[in-house]
Image (cartoon, rainbow, N blue to C red):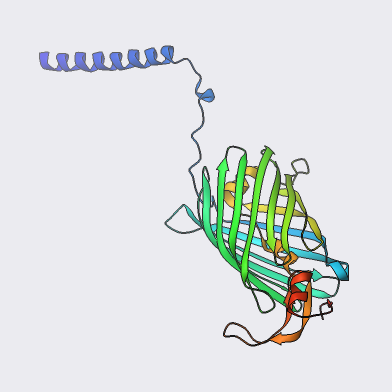
Amino acid sequence: MNIFLKAAFVAVTSVSCFSVANAADLILDPTPVAEQPAPSQPAVAVDALNFELSVLGGAYQRNVLGTASNAMFVASVATPLPIFHNLGAQLDAAVGIYDGDFTSSAAGLHLFWRDSEKGMIGIYGDWAYTDPEHGGRVGVELSSYHDRWTVDAFLGMRFGQHFNTEFTDEVDLSYYYTDDFRVSVGHRLTSRGHVGNLSFESLITDVGVDGLSVFGEIEAGEDSYVGGFAGIRYAFGGNSTSLIERDRRSSVQVRIPRNLASVTQCGDLDVPRPETSLRGEQTNLCASEDEINAVSTPGITKKN
C-alpha cells in the first residue's frame, strides 16, 4: 500500500511542477500567440501549377516602311518539377496578327532553378514567326532578388534563315513600389541594334477578380527604331496573391513578344548568300538598314 501511495505522490508532484513551469513561461513571455511572426514560406522554384493569359497590342517603327501594328494572345503555364522543389519549367505560346495582314506566332521554354528568396538561373529558348520571317534565340536566364529590387537578364544567341547569328540580350532592373506595382528600365540588343526599354505592371485589386493586371512597355534605339505594346493579363493557379510573389514564386518573365523588334526591318539581298550547312540560300536579311546596305543595295521591302 505504501508503494502505491508513494507512486501517486510522485505523479501528482510531477504534474504540479509541469503546470507551474508552463504558467511561469506564460508570465515571462506575455506576447499573445496571434502576434507571433508567421513562419516564412519555403523557398521554391514554382509554388504550384499556375497559368497566365494575356492579350496585348502595340506598334513598331519599321523606318522606311513606317509603322507596323501587332496584336497577340499569349498563354503560359509554369509547373514545379517532381522531386526537386527548386526546379521549375514554364512554356509560353502566342499567336496574333502582324501589320493587319500577316500571322505572328511564337513559343518559348524556360527550364530553371530558383530560390524565391534569392534569385534564379536557367536556360531559355524561343522561336518567333511573322510571315514570312522567323528566327530564334537560345541562352541563359538570370535573376537576382534584393528586397524590392530585381535584376533580370537573358544572355544568348540569335539565329535564323534571315538573321545574322549573333549575340543578343535582355537586361532589366525592376523596382516594386508596392507589392502590386512594378516599374522597370532595361536594355535590349536586337537585330537592329541597341534599344532602351521602360516597362510597368500593376495588379488590379478592386474589380472583384483576383489575378488581373495591366502592363506595358515602350522602347527606342538605334536604326531609328521605336516601339511599344500594352495589354491585360490574368494569372490563376498557384499560391501567390501579390505581384511580387507571383514574379518570384509562380511565373517567370514572358519574353516572346519582345523578339518582334528583330523582324521590323528586313530587306531583299541583290546577291543571295550561298547555302550553308545550317540554312539554305539567304535572299533576305533582317538587320539594321546600314547592315543590309553593306551586304547589297536592297529596297527595304514589305513582308509578302
Residue pictured at 80% horizontal, 64% vertical? 71
Counting labels gives 0
Q: Residue furthest left?
A: 2
Q: Position of residue 281 (x, y in %)?
A: 67, 87
Quadrant location, the C terminus: bottom right
Quadrant location, the N terminus: top left
Q: Position of residue 103 (x, y in %)?
A: 78, 74
Quarter of the rendering containing residue 110: bottom right
Residue pictured at 28% horizontal, 17% vertical? 15
Placement of 193 over or under 302, stated as above or below: above
Q: Residue furthest front?
A: 294
Q: Nearer the viewer, residue 294 or 279?
A: 294
Residue pictured at 72% horizontal, 63% vertical? 193
Q: Position of residue 119 (x, y in %)?
A: 53, 47
Q: Nearer the viewer, residue 84 or 124?
A: 124
Q: Position of residue 72 (x, y in %)?
A: 77, 65
Placement of 120 over or under 156, stated as above or below: above
Placement of 216 over or under 274, stated as above or below: above
Residue 183 seen in render: yes
Residue 211 seen in render: no
